[in-house]
Image (cartoon, coloured by chain):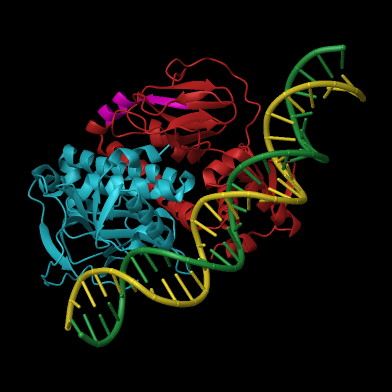
Chain colours: A cyan, B red, C green, D yellow
DNA sequence: CGTAGAATTGAACACTCTCAATTAGCGTGG
DNA sequence: CCACGCTAATTGAGAGTGTTCAATTCTACG
């Protein structure tokens, strides 16, 4: 659970910048108010940003790259709670410690703001307080949808839902470049990587999607994917 | 999706009041500030309190009884996100519509506060705004823990976790009276009711717990239950 | 090119589900 | 108060989805 998160390194090599552009609005989620002190930081592939139970000193926003947040059992089983793509805020806590571990999936740059300064701003500007609540509420909505997936959906339904989610979040010109490996997807969906792979192969065989390498996916029949979900 | 939630009926017959006392602190979660307009309402067993996608007019706090909040797929599969017991707040949304359906599990009385008046209070009193965020954040923490359970744990591990959770929330004198049936437990844990029943039987055979009827459970070996969870 | 990690594919197994029958519990009415 | 009837819960047997283990194949990158 040791981390370099609180000691940002000035490395800068983004080999993987797959995602759509950030809107001004999203940036303002954190920075738009009362000139908060924000700085950039870069993490290399697989580097830990913060660990579970660590004090929550900063709030983060992905600028480029991708981040996974997860919980782990003592024997190594891992549940990824969310993937955070450019524009997404993560690491926001109302209590003083992180409930999840966050790691860069690929080389990633983030914007970070001191939690204390955010709390301060929320004390002055009501819209900041409101924004913090709204962000947490959005995460809760995602978690609730994901519980439905984890508890009730079949393997194929899970994969279909995942594809549609990612399509909505990082499709550029009908193509998406997944930043995460099969094991990440599996740990997000509560499956094994073999099962994920089999589901994708089946969908490709049916012409529902096209694979250009394992990570480049083109959805050819979104309707079919939506129909899979009961 | 029709509901009587917004038209509180003055029925009053609590046949089932199993849970521990409320602390003043918990009540004040909603009522403690600036004399918010709060009223009571009663729901009978299995009555819907609000439905998914309905406008969120009220925020609720359980006074007695128990409530389940859930999402459903079109074919009837249901994922219960949480059980709400006396003292618990539910139905709090930062947006204007409910994301889940809420139903009384047994005859239940709730305290309800208009969302608009809460929003108003949050605009004046910063500690109210903070409290709203904290409540949502607490729900998020629960959801994250539950995703780990749903995605990674075995049937026996799920049941063990459930028993410890309920033990902590509604044990009185080492005994707990579950308000929910096996199917509710199953839909909460992402299992079938038969699997839940089998796990409980196994635990009883091992002397880990004692059943007095299906709903009255005494934990005899909490350590064993904790060890089940990797 | 050559290597190492990532992904695919196959076959056998296991855990949980499904279907079915039985038993227990509880409210209702005779 | 007991008998009845309905729902809930337990238990069993068999089937199926997803896992596990293992062997290739692919691909990204030095």
Residue shown at the point (53%, 21%) measured from the top left? B42
Whole-percent x and y of residue B56? Answer: 35, 26
Magenta: main secondary structure equals helix
Q: Is residue B114 magenta?
A: yes
The reply, left or right, for residue A72 in relation to residue B107 is left
In which quadrant will I find the N terminus of chain B?
Answer: top left
The reply, left or right, for residue A174 in relation to residue B52 is left
Residue shown at the point (60%, 39%) measured from the top left? B183
Residue shown at the point (28%, 55%) measured from the top left? A83
Relative vertical location of residue B158 with respect to residue A46 in this rendering, above or below: above
Residue shown at the point (42%, 49%) measured from the top left? A156
Relative vertical location of residue B104 with respect to residue A48 in this rendering, above or below: above
Whole-percent x and y of residue A204? Answer: 32, 53
Whole-percent x and y of residue A141? Answer: 34, 41
B105 or A191, nearer to the observer: A191
D3 or A121, nearer to the observer: D3
**Boundaries of the magenta span:** B111-121
Residue A180 placement: quadrant: bottom left
Q: Is residue B209 visible?
A: no
Residue A138 placement: quadrant: top left
Q: Is residue A12 magenta?
A: no
The reply, left or right, for residue A118 in relation to residue A101 is left
B169 or B194, nearer to the observer: B194
Whole-percent x and y of residue A35? Answer: 7, 49
């Amino acid at each position: 659970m040791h981390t370099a998160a609180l000691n940002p390194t000035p490395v800068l090599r983004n080999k993987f910048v797959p995602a759509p552009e950030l809107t001004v609005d999203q940036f303002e989620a954190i920075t738009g108010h009362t000139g908060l002190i924000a700085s950039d930081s870069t993490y290399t592939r697989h580097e830990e940003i913060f660990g579970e139970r660590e004090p929550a000193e900063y709030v983060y926003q992905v600028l480029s790259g991708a981040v996974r947040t997860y919980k782990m059992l003592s024997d190594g089983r891992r549940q990824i709670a969310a993937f955070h793509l450019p524009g997404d805020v993560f690491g926001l806590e109302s209590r003083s410690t992180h409930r999840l571990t966050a790691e860069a999936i690929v080389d990633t740059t983030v914007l970070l703001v001191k939690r204390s300064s955010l709390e301060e701003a929320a004390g002055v500007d009501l819209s900041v307080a409101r924004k913090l609540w709204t962000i947490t509420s959005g995460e809760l909505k995602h978690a609730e949808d994901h519980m439905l997936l984890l508890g009730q959906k079949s393997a194929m339904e899970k994969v279909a839902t995942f594809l549609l989610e990612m399509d909505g979040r990082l499709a550029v010109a009908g193509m998406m470049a997944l930043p995460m490996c099969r094991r990440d997807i599996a740990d997000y969906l509560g499956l094994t990587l073999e099962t994920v792979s089999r589901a994708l192969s089946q969908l490709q065989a049916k012409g529902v999607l096209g694979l250009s390498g394992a990570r480049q996916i083109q959805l050819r029949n979104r309707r079919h994917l939506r129909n899979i979900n009961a």
